[in-house]
Image (cartoon, rainbow, N blue to C red):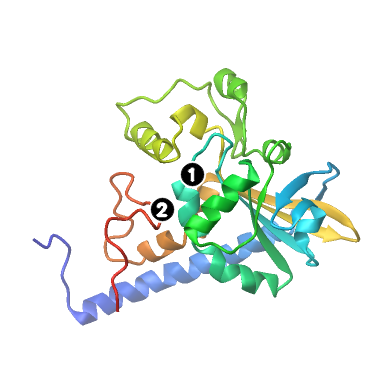
Amino acid sequence: MIKHPIGTRQEWLKARLDLLGAEKELTRRSDELAQRRQQLPWVRVDKPYRFETDHGAASLAELFQGRSQLLVYHFMFGPDYAAGCPSCSAIADGFNGIAVHLANHDVMLWAVSRAPFPKLQAYKERMGWTFPWASSFRTDFNADFSVSFTEQQQQTGGIDYNYRREEPWQGPDPGTGDESMLEQIAATTRTDAATYTRERPGVSAFVLDDGTVYHTYSAYARGLDGLWGMYQWLDRAPKGRNETDFWWRRHDEYEQPMPQT
């Protein structure tokens, strides 16, 4: 039963032109925000981080692989996880296609996670991904860029994430939809909600200038919304995101495979 307004083509076109003006304004505003990101001051990175990669140990500067810019997706895959975060996995599904274009435009794209490198390798193979993925296991990298926290921080209210201080962890409340969804998502990594949320998603940008690495930008939480390729498409679908629960899965876990053409 249709409950949506039905109109003529002329009525649709009038409404569409009104919307077009708002869309163009949003695009202009997005361009302005991109310029403001690029105008942020650079902060020198002096700590000698070491990562495990497909080619052995590497410094942060070596992740640039000859480029002057580096984008790091902070992928939620903690040492206690049995599988990567399904939300991060949905985002990362789009990396294969764009990483080669970025690499040929002076930008390296890496995922970085705290899980030991063999875990990342196995999961990467399972997902069929080819983009670079490094392990920051036993380093301060994730903590320093506000995407990994200790149990003590979680229990005492010592977590600063997305540029705000969180309240002490009280445990999931089954009466709230958000917490119930959190438990469901955590279960897919074979952890509990507390362990799962000690890792967080984010993106950080770096520049290499005259041999020195500088941190230029970081974003978290809804600041990553534009990286969810599927959501950009859903926002243009007739019913939008249309979410009532935790519906997305890792791409090899859906009951119905992709339709064959």
Residue 174 rendering spot, x and y as whole percentages: 31, 26
Residue 190's label in the rendered image is none
Q: Based on the displayed image, in which of its 4 quarters is residue 34 positioned?
A: bottom right
Residue 250's label in the rendered image is 2
Residue 41 at least partly seen? no
Residue 66 rendering spot, x and y as whole percentages: 81, 67
| 128 in relation to 115, above or below | below
Count of numbered circles on the image: 2
Q: Are marks 1 and 2 in contact (CB under 8 Å)?
A: yes
Residue 40 rendering spot, x and y as whole percentages: 74, 53
Q: Nearer the viewer, residue 219 or 75?
A: 75
Q: Amino acid at mark 1?
A: Ala
User: In 3D space, how far apart are the residues under numbered discs 1 and 2 (Cα atoms)?
Assistant: 10 Å
Q: Based on the displayed image, in which of its 4 quarters is residue 211 positioned?
A: bottom right
Q: Amino acid at mark 2?
A: Arg
Residue 83's label in the rendered image is 1
Q: Nearer the viewer, residue 212 or 238?
A: 212
Q: Residue lying furthest top in this view? A: 156
Q: Is residue 186 left or right of residue 256?
A: right
| 158 in relation to 225, above or below | above
Residue at 29 percent across and 72 percent down: it is 15
Residue 118 rendering spot, x and y as whole percentages: 61, 47
| Quarter of the figure that contains the C terminus | bottom left
Give the mark nearest the N terminus, 1 or 2: 1
Count residues near mark 1 (Cα–Cα under 10 Å), then give few for <14, some for 14-19, many for 20+: many
Q: Is residue 41 left or right of residue 105?
A: right
Count residues near mark 2 (Cα–Cα under 10 Å), then give few for <14, some for 14-19, many for 20+: some
Residue at 27 percent across and 55 percent down: it is 255
Residue at 38 percent across and 57 percent down: it is 252
Q: Is residue 112 left or right of residue 66?
A: left
Q: Secondary structure at mark 2?
A: loop
